[in-house]
Amino acid sequence: MRQMEGYRFVRTRDVEFRDVDAADHVNNAVYLTYLETGRIQYLIDVLGPEFAYELSLILAHITVDFRSPARFPETLELGARVTLIGTKSFVMEHEIRGGDGRVVLEASSVLVAYDYEANAPMAVPEDWRARLDAYEERSSVAT
């Protein structure tokens, strides 16, 4: 696996036959699943396995720029990183590269910390902030 510049978290994902549409490339909706899988794995890796049972987040916004098609049976590299931690939300950037290193997709998402019992946004927990900062090797800046 090649290291993606600027991304500490990188995982591979094989394009499966079911991911491909009539145009013979990965369907644009499938990329959202790729991003979700990478995002959740990043958060479990950084925040700990117990995070999988908490999932106190809501995906509030996602922007995707498609750069080049991916095809079956290609192996993709998925990079994810947290670039900004605010008071109640944080920003993740994502990149998917093809097996030859070309950029397939670039994306940015905003995740809001959410208290499902109160049915309202909540402050990003301090332990999340500390773990995310330590993983990304920087200090957070509240917005």
Image: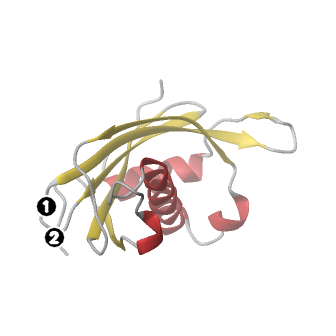
> Tag on residue 43?
none
Q: Position of residue 10 (x, y in %)?
A: 31, 65
> Tag on residue 2?
2
Residue at the outermost front position: 22
Quarter of the image with the N terminus is bottom left
Q: Position of residue 70 (x, y in %)?
A: 28, 59
Task: Name the residue carrying label 1.
Answer: 101
Circle nearer the viewer, 1 or 2: 1
Front residue (pair 75, 142): 75
Q: Amino acid at mark 2?
A: Arg
Q: CA distance from mark 1 to mark 2?
A: 8 Å
Who's the residue at 83% across and 36% down the image? 119
Packing grade of label 1 (10 A; few <14, some 14-19, many >=20) is: few
Who's the residue at 19% across and 60% down the image? 4
Left or right position of 141 against 55: left
Identify whether 100 is placed above or below 94: below
Query: Which callout, 1 or 2, points at the residue further toward the start of the chain?
Result: 2
Total numbered badges shown on the rendered structure? 2
Who's the residue at 39% across and 38% down the image? 108
Can residue 28 be seen from the camera position used here?
yes
Mark 1: which secondary structure? loop
Mark 2: which secondary structure? loop
Front residue (pair 67, 77): 67
Left or right position of 67 against 40: left
Left or right position of 143 against 113: left
Q: Amino acid at mark 1?
A: Gly
Q: Position of residue 118 (x, y in %)?
A: 86, 37
Q: Position of residue 123 (x, y in %)?
A: 65, 36
